[in-house]
Amino acid sequence: MTMLWLWIVKANTKRYWQKKYGKLAAITIAAVYLLIIVGGVVRSTGSGMGCPDWPKCFGSWVPPTSAEQLPSDYKEVYSEKRGEKNKRFASLLEVFGADQLAYQLRHDESLLIEADFNPVKTWIEYFNRLVGVTIGFLIMATFAVSFSFRSSRPGIFWASLATFVLVVFQGWLGSIVVSTNLLPWMVTVHMLPALVIVALLVWAKFQVQEESPIELKKEHRQKLGALTLLLIGFSLVQIILGTQVRELVDEAAVRHQYTNREVWIEELGIMFYIHRSYSIVILLFHLLLFYLVRKFAPQAANLNKWSSILLAVLLLEITSGVIMAYFAIPAFLQPMHLFFGTVLFGVLFYILLLVNSRRVEKMEQTDLNSDVCLLQEAGK
């Protein structure tokens, strides 16, 4: 009887922590995507240097609202601080053999130019940091809850730990982005770990949710899995191409001091046309996936729903790109274009998990075996 009671307590506790972890992971994923949007706003408005230091902003946890609150030599002070940090980062790059990048950090004087104080840009960047700190706390909470799965489902624990480590790494990268005066390739490097964080959180959440395995023939599962994996690779290539185009856009914006947007596209060169043409290939392959899901798994409501969401997000992504190309790159669409691209990656990864949901069956079998042992003990 005692063992039966223990089994009931264990089952209820397991369900409680599964729900708790699932909710936390979902909230954290949403917060990460919010940060991607806010980061895009920071970049499109040229607010990245609104706070010249990190983690504080103008040496304070709450930024100033006017230049009168700053010392007269604030530009020289923060420029010198960033210069010292760049030298330390350059030394680290040299350890890994990136001598050319290290040389640029040491000798490019433009990296130390301090912008005039702008309260609007300062508070946009400050809000970006507040969202980042909130995500840090959410991931800490997610990691703490993952301890309840350390024995039964260690993969969830290790994924949560990896996410926590990546967030710490992201915070450090953010400080380097500021110290290098928004060096374009550093901004790109800063964004990419966010995709890994999304993938880890989506995977961990998938493991704890009560998702029925999808009934698919072996060959159909293999075809859908291979195509989805291929599309994930395509989307990553497109995101990288997009970041290269974005770097060119940033350079055009600086040259024109964020005015004359109608001529920016003309200055982007062949990289823009590669990025644009590649989207046609991606659209065709997504349409193929949409068709095959309905052909191979017409009864799988959840898989069909997410394939529809995937296609809708892709169409929004392409539409936003077309509008930017033909209507002088509206500032409000720049962060949304990036947002749609990263959501596309997240949805593709989730579909891959759905298609390969037999892994969930194995995990559930492990829990079932444990429960059976407890029940057998209770019956003795």
Image: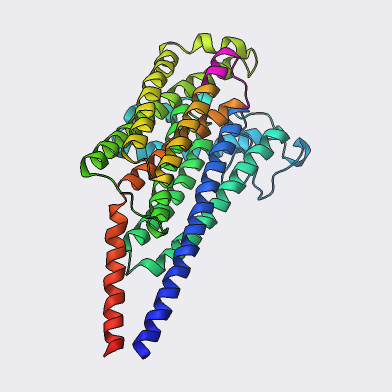
For image coordinates 51% across by 31% down, the residue present is 338
For image coordinates 36% across by 59% down, the residue present is 156
Can you give x and y, in whole percent of width and height, for residue 26 in the image? 50, 52
User: Which quadrant of the view contains residue 334?
Assistant: top right
Q: Is residue 161 above or below residue 117?
A: below
For image coordinates 37% across by 36% down, the residue present is 294
Can you give x and y, in whole percent of width and height, for residue 81 in the image? 55, 40
Can you give x and y, in whole percent of width and height, for residue 255 in the image? 57, 15
Q: Is residue 90 above or below residue 213?
A: above
Q: Is residue 302 visible?
A: yes
Residue 329 magenta: yes
Q: Residue furthest front?
A: 299
Q: Is residue 82 above or below residue 358?
A: above
Can you give x and y, in whole percent of width and height, for residue 295 in the image? 33, 35
Q: Is residue 196 visible?
A: no
User: Which quadrant of the view contains residue 50?
Assistant: top right
User: The C terminus is located in which quarter?
Assistant: bottom left
User: The N terminus is located in which quarter?
Assistant: bottom left
Q: Is residue 166 left or right of residue 151?
A: right
User: Which quadrant of the view contains residue 365?
Assistant: bottom left
Q: Is residue 195 left or right of residue 154?
A: right
Q: Is residue 83 left or right of residue 238?
A: right
For image coordinates 52% across by 8% down, the residue present is 266
- Nearest the viewer among 55 and 357 is 357
Residue 261 magenta: no
- What span is colored magenta in the figure? 321-332
- Nearest the viewer among 309 and 20 is 309
Q: Is residue 197 left or right of residue 123?
A: left
